[in-house]
Image: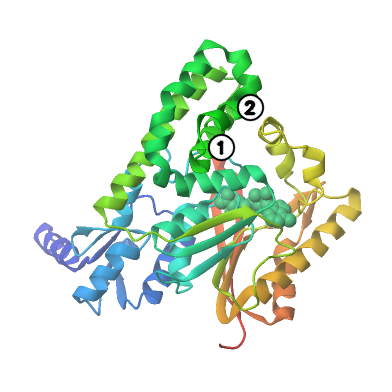
């Protein structure tokens, strides 16, 4: 092949690239999700340039606008930057996934937000629909739903998780109050660390009646508590540094909301038990969640320092946490029983014909593999779900350790 010819080919490819993937898209499962998302948005496409670029076959103002405002894996569409590209630029951390307020609090087992945005689109949720998240955790699904204008009802048994979800999604509505309290809170931290340790939460009650601002400052303290107990960092230095970053992140969120004219979803996150959900039958338009993966990870122990700091009795809390109840073989039986109750509830509250996405992996407990994925598929099918997609999410983490999870997309039988 002559140089001239290959140059011509290169130009043709560039001309046809209506869609270019973001640089961070590396894994096969991400490409699968990108393609499923395009199909759900009604885009007909052809891949070009070694699967990193796409040509839109039904190109119109409407299809371009849809990809620009909704998609999750593309950097540009028809030479415009996508909204998601602008959103991930608003990042105070060095981790590409921890943009806006996602990074606040080092919670173990966070979802990948980009994947959640894609899944919301893949299951066909639109602005004004309601998504339910029975294991809200650090609030990843909540923030992504909010950005896409989808309403969300989230529950978690952990009060720490409820605070995280609220702070990430509600602080933009209390930004002025948050700013006005900053000086008073930091002054008292630096003047007397010991007394602030003792009276911090009472002091917040005295300073403001705004619950959102209070939650913000509670979590600011817990980020520092966690830094101090896990990484041995100085409490007050960490507090001041993280508080500044938290404020900057909320400011970034407000800026991007205005710049992209986002119509945010309504978010409600509360303490709740996934085994016994306070929602009517057939009431939600979709579910995206990730339950505890069997009995391998002790979520209570992980966050013990923060839960105790908030004044909770950790052993009482344990009684309602799935995956940590009981001992030995009984522990696994309890886990299975709890998850059956949870799946019954997921079936009950979801509207017929709608989708429930469960992200889950097999766990290893005392050297044995616990087949949580197979258990989930079998039980959900028994309830009346069909398994529409089972996407292997294989990633290599730190030190090249392979992690395999499954993205299970179930559809509830029937239609409303
Ligand atoms: C895998 S984590 C979810 C992480 C979440 N996807 C995220 O991005 O942060 C599982 C969550 O289940 C919660 N959990 C455990 N038992 C529960 C119960 N009975 N009801 C509701 N939530 C529960 C834990 O507190 C934990 O936050």
**Can you say whether 57 is above or below 314 in the image?**
below
Q: Quadrant of the N terminus?
A: bottom left
Q: CA distance from mark 1 to mark 2?
A: 10 Å
Q: Nearer the viewer, residue 240 or 94?
A: 240
Q: Which mark is residue 106?
A: 1
Q: Position of residue 412 (x, y in %)?
A: 61, 80
Q: Position of residue 171 (x, y in %)?
A: 44, 43
Dot 2 surroundings within 10 Å: few (below 14), some, or many (20 or more)?
Answer: few
What residue is pinned by disc 2?
230
Label 1 within 8 A of ligand 1 by Cβ: no
Q: Where 161 sits versus 70, above or below?
A: above
Q: Callout 1: 10 Å neighbours few (<14), some, many (20+)?
A: some
The answer to whether residue 293 is visible is: no
Give left or right: position of 20 versus 407. Answer: left
For the residue pair 407 and 178, the one nearer the viewer reads as: 178
Q: Is residue 292 left or right of residue 39?
A: right
In the depicted structure, whether residue 342 falls above or below residue 169: below
- Decide if residue 57 is in sight here: yes
Tell me, yes or no, whether the two marked residues, 1 and 2, touch with CB atoms within 8 Å.
yes
Element type at mark 2: helix
Quarter assignment of residue 106: top right
Classify the position of the C terminus by image quarter: bottom right
* Residue pictured at 42% horizontal, 63% vertical: 31
Quadrant of res 315: top right
């Amino acid at each position: 092949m002559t140089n001239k010819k290959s140059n011509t080919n290169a130009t043709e490819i560039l001309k046809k690239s209506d869609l270019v993937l973001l640089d961070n898209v590396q894994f096969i499962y991400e490409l699968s999700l990108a393609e499923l998302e395009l199909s759900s948005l009604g885009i007909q496409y052809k891949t070009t340039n070694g699967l990193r670029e796409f040509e839109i076959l039904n190109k119109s103002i409407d299809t371009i606008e849809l990809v620009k405002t909704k998609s999750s894996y593309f950097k540009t569409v028809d030479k415009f930057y996508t909204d998601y590209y602008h959103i991930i630029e608003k990042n105070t951390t060095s981790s590409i996934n921890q943009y806006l307020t996602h990074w606040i609090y080092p919670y173990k087992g966070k979802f990948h937000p980009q994947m959640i945005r894609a899944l919301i689109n893949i299951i066909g949720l639109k602005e004004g629909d309601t998504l339910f998240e029975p294991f809200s955790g650090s609030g990843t699904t909540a923030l992504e739903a909010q950005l896409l204008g989808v309403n969300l009802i989230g529950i978690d048994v952990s009060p720490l998780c409820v605070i995280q979800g609220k702070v990430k999604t509600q602080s933009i509505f209390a930004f002025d109050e948050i700013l006005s309290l900053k000086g008073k809170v930091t002054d008292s931290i630096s003047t007397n660390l010991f007394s602030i340790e003792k009276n911090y939460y009472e002091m917040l009650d005295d300073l403001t009646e705004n619950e959102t601002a209070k939650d913000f400052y509670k979590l600011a303290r817990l980020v520092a508590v966690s830094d101090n107990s896990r990484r041995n960092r100085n409490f007050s230095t960490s507090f001041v540094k993280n508080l500044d970053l938290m404020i900057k992140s909320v400011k970034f969120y407000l800026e991007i909301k205005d710049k992209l004219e986002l119509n945010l979803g309504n978010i409600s996150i509360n303490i709740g038990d996934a085994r016994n959900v306070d929602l009517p039958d057939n009431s939600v338009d979709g579910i995206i969640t990730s339950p505890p993966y069997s009995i391998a990870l002790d979520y209570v122990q992980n966050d013990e320092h923060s839960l105790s700091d908030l004044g909770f009795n950790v052993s009482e809390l344990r009684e309602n946490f799935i995956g940590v109840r009981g001992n030995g073989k009984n522990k696994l039986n309890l886990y299975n029983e709890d998850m059956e109750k949870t799946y019954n509830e997921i079936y009950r509250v979801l509207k017929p014909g709608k989708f429930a996405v469960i992200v889950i992996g097999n766990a290893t407990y005392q050297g044995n593999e616990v087949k949580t994925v197979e258990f989930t598929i079998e039980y959900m099918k028994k309830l009346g779900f069909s398994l529409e997609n089972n996407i292997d999410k294989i990633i290599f983490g730190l030190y090249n350790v392979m992690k395999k999870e499954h993205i299970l997309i179930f559809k509830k039988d029937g239609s409303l």
